[in-house]
Image (cartoon, rainbow, N blue to C red):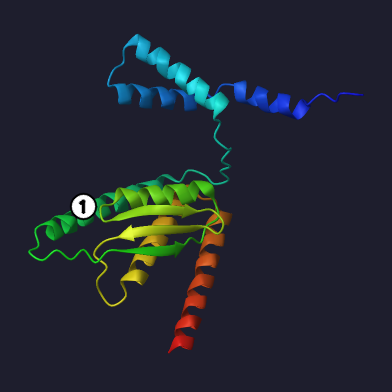
């Protein structure tokens, strides 16, 4: 009986053993923050913990085909800060209202981009803003489920969906390639056309 060496498994193990300095460094920072100390033993423990995580529980590779766009990043951060101030003020108003009526609900939003990285960034930016939190992320199809407060107005669901697409657009303008931005806008236009057709059929 001939035994064929499992070269693929060896390559996977070799790749895992190949250290990832940036990932390990970030894990050391998180480890020290959790312990609240930068003692040498804490640093060593963080290094061992980070190395163990990268070998035993490696994260799947995330491919990024875009590029860093400084102007888009500044716009994205500025909008995030404005949303934080505006939403925090609204949450403060709701906290002091005599009659408590949060008008909360779960809303589904289908994303127009197709990237793990952009989906995670969009979900994180939305969850940072008070009043909205992503409760579930679906990869296929790209979809987010949000718990949102203060769902008032003529069409609050459409408002939340538009807010998510605006965040997605800013993320693409900050980190996406020209092809990804064009594909996002084309997919968003297709979604808009389908929604208009559904509204026309319902009316």
For the view shown, which residue lies furthest in the top direction? 40
Which residue sits furthest bottom?
A: 203
| Location of residue 62 in the rendering, given as x and y in whole percent from the top left corner | 56, 41
Residue 140 or residue 66, whichever sits in front: 140
Relative vertical location of residue 121 with respect to residue 155 in this rendering, above or below? above
What residue do we see at 24% from left, 65% from top?
150
Estimate the x, y position of residue 123 in percent, counting from the top left. Answer: 41, 51
Quadrant for the N terminus in the image: top right
Relative image position of residue 121 (x, y in whole percent): 43, 47
Quadrant the C terminus occupies = bottom left
Give the residue at x 50% y 46%: 117
Look at the picture and state if 169 lies above or below 66.
below
Please state if 190 lies on the left or on the right of 128 as rendered. right
Q: Is residue 50 above or below residue 179?
A: above
Q: How far across and how far down the image is residue 194, in percent?
A: 52, 76
- Relative to 83, 76 lies left or right: right
Q: Residue furthest right?
A: 1
191 or 73, which is in the foreground? 191
Residue 75 seen by the camera: no
Residue under label 1, please give it: 85
Callout 1 crowding tier (Cα within 10 Å): few <14, some 14–19, many ≥20: few
At a point 78% along the width and 26% down the height, the residue shown is: 6
Residue at point 38% right, 15% down?
A: 43
Can the viewer see residue 111 in this picture? yes
Q: How many marks?
A: 1
Report helix, strand or loop for mark 1.
helix
């Amino acid at each position: 009986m001939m035994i064929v060496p499992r070269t693929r498994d060896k390559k996977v193990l070799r790749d895992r053993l190949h250290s990832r300095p940036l990932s390990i460094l970030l894990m050391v920072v998180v480890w020290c923050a959790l312990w609240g100390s930068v003692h040498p033993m804490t640093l060593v423990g963080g290094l061992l913990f980070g190395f163990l995580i990268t070998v035993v529980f490696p994260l799947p590779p995330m491919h990024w085909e875009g590029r860093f766009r400084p102007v888009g990043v500044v716009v994205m951060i500025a909008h995030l800060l404005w949303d934080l101030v505006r939403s925090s003020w609204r949450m403060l108003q709701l906290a002091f209202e005599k009659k408590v009526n949060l008008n909360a609900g779960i809303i589904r939003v289908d994303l127009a981009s197709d990237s793990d990285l952009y989906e995670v960034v969009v979900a994180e930016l939305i969850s940072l803003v008070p009043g909205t939190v992503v409760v579930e992320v679906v990869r296929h199809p790209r979809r987010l489920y949000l718990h949102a407060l203060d769902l008032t107005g003529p069409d609050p669901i459409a408002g939340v969906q538009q807010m998510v697409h605006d965040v997605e657009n800013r993320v693409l303008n900050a980190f996406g390639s020209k092809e990804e931005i064009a594909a996002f806008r084309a997919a968003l236009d297709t979604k808009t056309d389908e929604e208009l057709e559904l509204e026309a059929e319902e009316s």
